Amino acid sequence: MKIIKRNGAEAVFDIDKIVMAVTKANDAVEEKVRMTPLQIERISQSVQIACEEMGRSPSVEEIQDLVEDEIMQTGAFEVARKYITYRYVQSLKRQTNTTD
């Protein structure tokens, strides 16, 4: 399966990138509200299945939205907040790095 990167290029879908991103958000919260590695794996697999069911190449933004939804569906709202905040900060960095 392919995805559409922000620059419009196609790339191969890599579930490990989702696992790493969610794990980083998970590691940034207190231990008592963290998800288990199994929950993170299931989130990643659910996102992969949703992408495959689209019948087209999803964009990075669409994939990230799916990840947010899946995290929230598990009830890990603190992890979701960290994930969303990280996305927002990265978006701001990209905007300041443009030469427009």
Image (cartoon, rainbow, N blue to C red):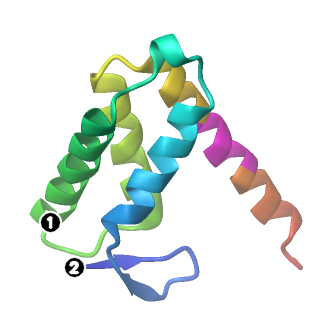
Q: Which residue is mark 2?
A: 1
Q: Quadrant of residue 73?
A: top left
Instruction: Specify whether 94 is left or right of 73.
Output: right
Q: Which residues are magenta?
A: 83-89
Q: Quadrant of residue 39?
A: top left
- Determine whether 5 is above or below 66 in the image: below
Q: Residue at x 26, y 46 (%)?
A: 41
Q: Nearer the viewer, residue 40 or 51?
A: 40
Q: Position of residue 22 (x, y in %)?
A: 46, 44
Q: Residue at x 40, y 87 (%)?
A: 10
2 and 1 marks in contact (CB < 8 Å) = yes
Q: Residue at x 32, y 74 (%)?
A: 13
Quarter in which the N terminus is drawn: bottom left
Q: Position of residue 82 (x, y in %)?
A: 60, 31
Q: Identify the element where label 1 is drawn.
A: helix
Q: Identify the element where label 2 is drawn.
A: loop
- Of callouts 2 and 1, the N-terminal one: 2
